[in-house]
Image (cartoon, grey):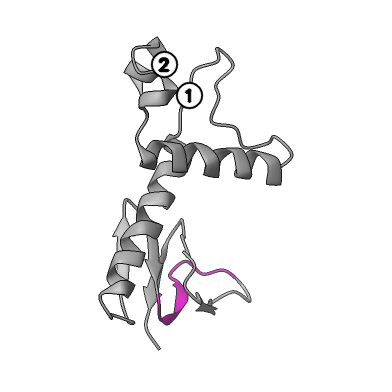
Amino acid sequence: MAAVNRGDVPVADWSGEMMEVQALARQTKDETDGYFDIRKPDGSLDPSGIVKGWAIRNAAGIVQRAGISDFFIEAGGDPKHSWRGGILFIEQTPGLEGYLVDANGRATPTTGFGALCLP
């Protein structure tokens, strides 16, 4: 990205993957009314907020095309899986001991003290 932001790599030389990430970033910016924008105030591009999810999605596609339907991909705390699981809260939170997550192929990131469990 440093080379792109310096102008060393013109748009015409960007890879197909880079163009896909840029298109996804534009779509996300439009869908969030500009709240999510990979362009920094100085005009440089920083796709780090979208690239990890894009890579996880692509990895899941590779696994699915290989005929595997039950899988779990975790990349730095952002999982994607094809199974139903639950979140069990280890902290004592009155009335909130856990809940069931039906991911349906979507990521279910969590933060805090908890554990992802299989039913």
Above or below for 58 versus 92? above
Q: How many labels does the image show?
A: 2
Q: Position of residue 106 (x, y in %)?
A: 49, 68
| Residue type (three-letter) at the residue carrying disc 1 | Leu
Q: Position of residue 99 (x, y in %)?
A: 55, 78
| Residue occupying the point 40% across, 59% down | 57
The disc at residue 45 is: 1
Dot 2 alpha-carbon crowd within 10 angstroms: few under 14, some 14 to 19, many 20 or more:
few
Q: Quadrant of the N terminus?
A: top left
- The quadrant holding residue 7 is top left
Q: Is residue 90 magenta?
A: yes
Point out the residue furthest to the bottom here. 119
Closest to the observer, 99 or 40: 40
Q: Is mark 2 on a helix, strand or loop?
A: helix
- The quadrant holding residue 74 is bottom left
Q: Position of residue 91 (x, y in %)?
A: 47, 66
Closest to the observer, 57 or 76: 57
| Residue occupying the point 46% across, 79% down | 86
Q: Is mark 1 on a helix, strand or loop?
A: loop
Residue 69 appears left or right of 66: right
Q: Do the residues labelled 2 and 1 touch (CB within 8 Å)?
A: yes
| Residue occupying the point 32% across, 17% down | 3
Give, as a single range, the part of the protein colored magenta.
82-93
Residue 95 appears left or right of 78: right
Is residue 95 among what the camera can see? yes
The residue indicated by pointer 2 is 5
